[in-house]
Image (cartoon, grey):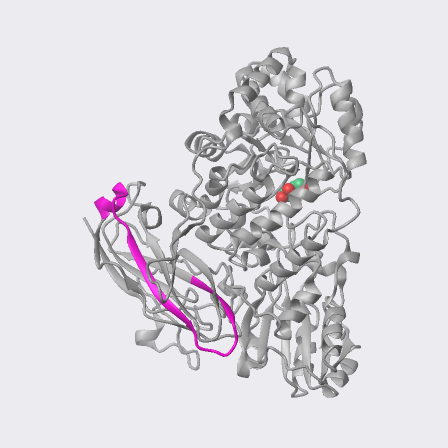
Amino acid sequence: MRLLRVVLCGCLCPCLLLSIVAAQNTTPPAWANNPQIETKIDALLKQMTLDEKVGQLIAYSQGAPTGPGTGRTGYKEMVAKGRLGSIFNLTGADETNAMQKIAVEQSRLHIPLLFGLDIIHGFRTEFPVPLALSATWDPPLIEQTARVAAKEASHAGIRWTYSPMVDIARDARWGRIVESGGEDPYLGSAIAAAYVRGYQGEKLGGPESIAACTKHFVGYGAAEGGRDYNSAEIPDRLLRQVYLPPFQATVEAGTASFMSAFEALNGVPATANAFTLTQILKKEWAFKGFVASDWNSIGELIPQGVAKDHAVAAAKAFLAGVDMDVESNAYGPHLAALVKAGTVPESMIDDSVRRVLRIKVALGLFDHPFADGIGSNGMAPQDAVLARKAAEESFVLLKNDGGLLPLKATGKTIALIGPLADDAYQMLGAWAAKSDAKDVITLRSALTKQVEATQGHVIYVKGADILTTSDKGFTEAVGAARKSDAVVLALGEDAGLMTGEASSRAHLDLPGNQQQLLEAVMATGKPVVLLVFSGRPLVLDWADQHVPAIMEVWFPGVQAGPAIANVVLGNSSPSGRLTVSFPRAVGQEPLYYNHYNTGRPAGDTDLSHPPRYFGEKFLSRYVDEQNSPLYPFGHGLTYGTVAYSPTSASTNSISATDLNAGTAKLTVTAEVKNTGGRWADEVVQLYIRQRDTSVVRPVRELKGFRRVHLEPGASQKVGFTLGREELKFWNIDMKDVVEPAALTVWVAPNSSSGNPANVTIGQ
Ligand code: BGC
C-alpha cells in the first residue's frame, strides 16, 4: 500500500511549496535479493545436518514468561550443539556475549544466535505507549523513537524486537489496544512503516539496526468481545481493506520478520493458517524474511482443537508457513522426525532455514556477533528530550471549557490530586523493556518545580489508590482542593494490570473509587483539570458533563511529568488527536468511525423521551444511548482556534478508467487559519466517502493527514492528492479497483466534522 502524497502550500504562494511523500518504498529491501547473502546460505545449508537446520527454527525464552514455558533448561548445551538458533528475554551485553561466544566458538558451523526482546515503546529510554505515540499523528517522530530504541538495544546485544504490533484495534475492551496504532488502516499503515524504518535504519546491517517483527498476523485485534486470545471472524473483504494494510505496509518498508497470532481466524488458527501465512504473506506480498510463532501458539493448536499433540501441531504450523517455533517446544522434538516420516518435505525446511539465516547474515551477525555494551549506563540526554517531545505531542485535549487550560498558575495555589500524580512506575506503561522507574520524572515533581518558579504553590494529595474501595484519602483531597485556586486531578488505569496482554476489561470507567473521588473534588466548586492516564478509551461521560477541562495523557514514559506540566501550564500546546473512538457507554463497543451505513441510519437521536413509533423507533440505534462516540476519531483541541475553509476539489468529475490506469489524479484543498491568540499544531485530516458502488463503503475513510504549525493569525492551504491508491477498494468481484462513484471529500479537523465537496467518478 502506498501512502498519500501530501501537498502543502503557504497561502501567499499557492503553487510553490510542494510535496512530501510519506512512504512510497515498494522496492524489496536490499537483503531480500542479495546474491552474496544467498551464496553464503547455500554453502551453510550444504553442511548442515537436519538437526542443525531445525535448531535454526527454534527460539526459547530465558525467563519473563507471558505464557506456559517449555520447562527447558540447558540452553548452553543446545547452543553448543547447534540445536538452538535464537534466544529471547536474555539481556545485557555481558549476558548475550557469553551465550554468543558458545554459539560462534563451540557450535560446529559457528552460526551466531539472534537475541530477541519485546522492545515495544523504548528499550532504556521509555517513550509513551504505542497508542499514545499513534495520537501524535507524526510518523517521522515515531520513527525517531524506534531509532533510539534500536540504538540502545543493539549495543546490549539485542538485534530483534517483537515490534511493531500493527493490529487494527476497534474495541476498547481489548487490553492490547494500548500496543496498537489505533482503529484506522491508513494511519496505522503510516505508523507501522515508520516503526520498521526506525528499528531497521538505513541498512539492516548497520551496527545500530535491529530486525523488526511485525505482529500479530493477523486479526488478533478483532477478538470477539474484546477478550484477549479469543477467536475472530473477519470476512475477506474486511480483512483485505482494514486488517491487512498495516501488515503489508511493513513488508513494503522491509520488515525482517513476522509473528503469527494466537487467535482462530475464521475457524483456522492464525498459527496454522496457510491462506494468510503462505498465500498472502509469502506469495502475494513476496515476503522474504521469516515468520515466528507467538509464545506457545503452536502448542495452543492443541487446546484450540486442531492438533492432538505437539507433533501434529508442529506439522500444521510448519506446513502453513510458520518458520520458527517460539517457546512451544514443538519443532525441536518433532520436526526432524516429521521430515523423516515424509510429512514435511526437507525442501521446506531449507526454505525456512534460508529465511532465518538471511536475516542473521543481513544483520551482520556473522561478522560482528558481539555487543559492545556502549551506553549501558543509562539514557542519553538528547533521548530524554525526544521522549518529552513525543509525550507532549501525544496528549489529546478532549475538552477545554472557558479556556481553563492552560492554567494560570503564577502566584496561585494548585491542588494536585490522584494516584497517578506521583507514581513513577506507572508512567512506563505496559511492556517497559529495560527502562527504570528511577529515570521517570513524575507530574508531582515537575509541576511543583514549574509552579514554584512563578511564585505559585502545589499541594499534593494522593486521595486514593488506583484500585481501592477505600475513601480514606477523600477528606484530605477535598481539603486541599478547597484551599486552592484550581485542581489538577491525575486519575486512570493501572498500566500493568489493566493494559496490555491479558488485560481485557468489561467495564471502561475509572477503576476503584476514582469516580467518587472525582465527584467529591468537583463538589468543591473549584476549577478542575482532569488528566486521564489510560491505555485505552475510557467511558468519560460523567466527566464530560461536569468537568471543564479533560486531557488524555495515556502512559507518557520517562518524561511524563515535564511533558504534562509544559502542556498544562501553556509552555507547549496540546496537539495529539485520537486514533481510537471514545465511547459514551461500553455497550457501543466495538466502536469505530469508518463503519458502513445501514439502510436505516439514525444519526444522533433525542434521548429525552422513548423513541416515538414513527420516524424514531425503527432505526439503527440504541433506545438508551446515542450512536456517536463521545469523542470521535481524529478529535483533539489545541490552545489556538483553527478555522477551516470549505473543501475544494480540483475537478468535479474524473474518470475511473483513468484513475485505474494511474493517469488521473484529483487534488483536494482547504485553507486552515489560526483565529486564536496562541500558536497551534493542527492535524489536518482528509476523509472520503464513495456511494453508488457495487458494495457498501464506509461512511468516512481517512486518506491523508498533515501536521501544520500555525502562529496566531497565520493560515495555510493544505492540499492532498487522491489517485488510484486512495480510491480503490475490493469490489463485488473481489477486484481491488476504482469504481465509478459519487465521491464526497472532507478536509476536516476530525472524523465527524468538516465542509464537504462532491466529485463524480465517471466511467
Ligand atoms: C505476546 C507477544 C510477545 C511474546 C514474547 C506473547 O505472549 O503475544 O506479543 O512478543 O509474548 O514475549
- Magenta stretch containing residue 221, yes or no? no
Q: For this view, does 763 lie left or right of residue 199?
A: left
Query: Residue placed at 57% from the left, 70% from the top?
Result: 573
Query: Residue placed at 29% from the left, 61% from the top?
Result: 744
Instruction: Where is residue 267? Give x, y as percent.
Output: 49, 39
Against 585, residue 60 (above or below) is above
Where on the image, by quarter, is ligand 1? top right
**Can the viewer see residue 166 in this picture?**
no
**Can the viewer see residue 711 in this picture?**
yes
Q: Quadrant of residue 48?
A: top right
Q: Residue furthest top?
A: 46
Instruction: Where is residue 598? Give x, y as percent.
Output: 33, 61
Q: Quadrant of residue 505?
A: bottom right
Against 542, residue 101 (above or below) is above
Instruction: Where is residue 75? Give x, y as percent.
Output: 77, 27
Q: For this view, does 96 lie left or right of residue 248?
A: right
Instruction: Where is residue 692? Give x, y as percent.
Output: 24, 55
Against 601, residue 456 (above or below) is below
What range of the chain is rendered magenta?
656-684
Query: Residue placed at 76% from the left, 85% from the top?
Result: 479
Which of 467 and 480 lies nearest the eye of the viewer?
480
